Image (cartoon, rainbow, N blue to C red):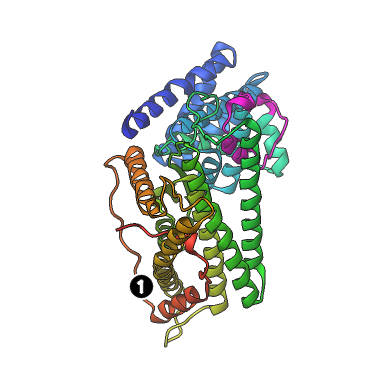
Amino acid sequence: MGKASRQRRQKKDHDRQRERAARDRASPPQAEEIAILIATAGRAVEAGDEAGFYRAVDQLTAERAPGWGRAVSRTLVDLVKFTVTGAWKNGWQPAELARQAGRAATAAHAAMAADMIVAEMRRYAAATVDPRWATQVAALAVTAPGADDGQYLSAWRAAVGEADPTAPIAIAVQLLHVLATLPVLEVLLPIPGDITGRPAHPTPGTAASTAAGHDADERMLSRIRALLAKAESTEFEQEAEALSARAQELMAKYSIDHALLAVRAGNKEEPGGRRVAVDNPYEGPKTTLLNTVAEANRCRVIWSQDVGLATVVGFPADLEAVELLFTSLLVQANSAMMRAGGKKDQVGRSRTRAFRQSFLVSYSIRIGERLAEAATQAEQEALAEQSAGGDGGAGPAGAGTDLVPFLAARLVAVDDAVDGLFGGRLKKGRASRVTDAEGWASGRAAADLASLRNREAVAEPRPS
């Protein structure tokens, strides 16, 4: 089903369920009245009618009959959880959903969205939930744990110390509107309960060797993360350079070994997607940096600017390398910008924003140049290692020189995966503007200091 069709279906389902859930949760007259008031408040939000919105919220807040408050709470919780599930079906993952609630509204809306996501997840057995999905849910902070649906709004109000009794209802209705009007995204993970849709992750050997391989991967990634964290936090440039170099060596080994072991074992490894949050300020230059790192790792980036998310498409080990290195380089760039301080023009007006945007654009371009310089050497060394390795020179298909067509085939597979996810809906974006010469020069210098001398494995070249 196409993206536009899913969007239309989402809206119809939401409208149909909004009043149905209300009628099912209270006595018929009360349920009908609650449903009408919630629908009225929702239409007021959509129309920008603040006065009409708060009239409906005031009526929902007032205890109009015995059990009214509990019925309102149950109804709103049901509706929000239903809309959460609808968003999942339309490609939104738990962390993205909570983040977008905060972007579109406030931190309070994000907190309530997290509660609703966690509550909805209780419906699903652990065996029916993808581990990556479960990890995102586990990372969400819960504001009002343990409250049943009928007590949730009052428990939430008490937990945050909110004095206004209308606030939790207002936030719930606004959150309902935010979730119901989200754009449709590409589905990158199987949603809870979708056992048959779970992507396979084949690994060689027995169950014991499979577990051992996973543990080895986790140990390697943990070491890489620890090295990069130290590189970002140290005050000594030479130490940071040495730590970054060691992390890049490990990424090199992880990425290439993972790919070659998979093909030698006869496993069919497929590209996948991972979304990376790209926040303001300077989201354009930050996305440029992400794209530079992704291209060096045989991945593709598609930026959904309206929701501040970039989809990176590639093979699993390459996706890990992209996210780790992008995060580290961005931290280093931000630190360098902060050290440079604010900037003013000749008449004393601030030009800090222009300086930092130009800095990041230049930084990204220079990083790309350095990755390209390292790429040719990286492929040559990988070919030499394959020819003289302990396997008698056997590459993925029997000879060391087969590495080039092997990598080329993986690039084609990534491009095919992008076409499968996005079809013909992609359009070329505009480059970020550079308006500050000092920012450009400073960004280029900072990129030179970001040590990439052992960057080979995560800077594999794109074969010509």
Amino acid type at image mark 1: Val
Please rate how many residues cluster around mark 1, counting C-alpha atoms within 10 Å: few if below 14, some from 14 to 19, many from 20.
some
Question: Residue, x 39% and y 49% (percent of image)?
Answer: 306
Percent x, y of residue 110: 57, 43
Name the one closer to the observer, 174 or 185. 185
In this picture, residue 176 sits left or right of residue 15: right
Residue 407: image location, x then y, percent = 39, 51
Q: Is-magenta flag for residue 136?
A: yes
Closer to the camera in the image, 219 or 348 = 219
The magenta segment: 122-151
User: Which residue extends farthest front?
Assistant: 392
* Residue picked out by circle 1: 434
Q: Is residue 366 magenta?
A: no
Q: Quadrant of residue 223?
A: bottom right
Residue 463 in sight from this viewpoint? yes
At horizontal 36% and vertical 39% (from top left) the residue drawn is 421
* Res 280 visible: no
| Residue 26 position within the rendered picture, expressed as x and y whole percent measured from the top left | 59, 15
Nearest to the observer: residue 441 or residue 395: 395
Q: Quadrant of the N terminus?
A: top left
- Between 123 and 296, the residue placed more toward the observer is 296
**Residue found at the far top of this picture:** 28
Identify the residue shown where x is 28% and y is 54%.
Answer: 428
